[in-house]
Image (cartoon, helix red, strand yellow):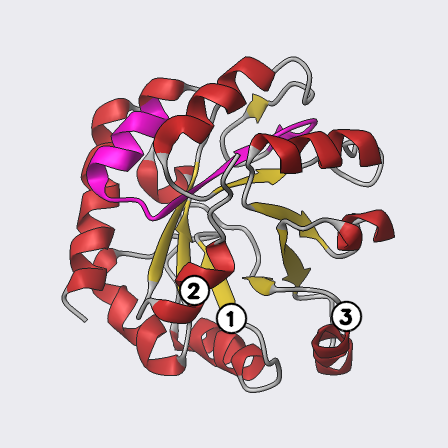
Amino acid sequence: MLRLYLLDMLTKNKMTLIVSLPESNIELAQAALKGGADALKVHANVYHKASGKTFGNFEEQKNFYKELLKSGLPVGIVPGTDITCMTQDEVAEAEDMGFSFISMFAHHMPIYMLESKMDKMIAITEDYDIEHIKALNDINADIIEADVITDEPGKRIHVSELMKYKRIINNVNKPVVVPTQRIIIPEEVKYMYDIGVKGIMIGVIVTGNTVDSMEKTTRAFKDAINSL
């Protein structure tokens, strides 16, 4: 299957909009598509704290994944944690199915993931110092996901968070994606763009978990990106 690469989008676009689905639901995925998502992200083998959902294993969700991969957009997968991670054979199967990217915390990612032809979006936390982050310049990572603030779903971001994102951008030579660990509103996209953020990944904290809220929020972020 032809694979669409997220890295290509992040490199070419002013800003790329990724939607992290709060559950494995094709209607929510279609709502994100209608709203203008550039890429989608799904989960396997994890309990997702923000959504309160437990995602089944790769085999259990395979039919959903196959349907989603017909969307024509890059689709990425969170393959689990260090304890529940997809096997090397399952990663190879996901690659063959047409997944675009792997999304995983650095401290959960097995080294065999680096062998995949899928883009590797490696998430870093506030616990990593800048020297650890700079080390990713010499590791087979393609994209940096900046999970560098504390998860506080009802709280807005501040200038201090922009400073944290900018510090990372200044020290890595790979595109940086910012997830919505806290509330980010569409009007704040321009400030992300100004400091060099290449992608916004919106999740349940801002999209909600209904079809209407998913489409409406995705469209609002897409409009903000188009106005840059």
* Residue closest to the eye, 91 or 160: 91
Q: Residues within 10 Å of mark 1 (few under 14, many from 20)?
A: some
Q: Let me know if residue 181 appears in the view.
A: yes
Q: Residues within 10 Å of mark 2 (few under 14, many from 20)?
A: many
Instruction: Give residue 223's position: percent from left, percent from top.
Output: 16, 55
Q: CA distance from mark 3 to mark 2?
A: 19 Å
* Residue closest to the eye, 41 or 133: 41
Magenta stretch bounds: 28-48
Q: CA distance from mark 1 to mark 2?
A: 7 Å
Question: Position of 148 compared to 58: left or right?
Answer: left
Question: Residues at badges 3 and 2 in contact (C-beta under 8 Å)?
Answer: no
Where does label 1 land, which residue?
A: 175
Label 2 sits on what residue type? Answer: Leu
Q: Inspect the magenta stretch and tell me whether residue 166 lies in it.
A: no
Label 1 sits on what residue type? Answer: Pro
Q: CA distance from mark 1 to mark 3?
A: 14 Å
Mark closest to the chain's N terminus, 3 or 2: 2
Mark closest to the chain's N terminus, 1 or 2: 2
Label 2 SS: helix
Instruction: Give residue 47's position: percent from left, percent from top.
Output: 65, 28
Where does label 2 land, which residue?
A: 10
Q: Let me know if residue 148 appears in the view.
A: no
Q: Is 215 drawn above or below residue 6 in the view shown?
A: above
Label 3 sits on what residue type? Answer: Ile
Instruction: Give residue 60's position: percent from left, percent from top.
Output: 65, 13
In which quadrant is the C terminus drawn?
bottom left
Where does label 3 land, which residue?
A: 139
Q: Residue at x 21, y 39 (%)?
A: 35
Instruction: Give residue 103's position: percent from left, percent from top.
Output: 62, 48
Label 1 SS: loop
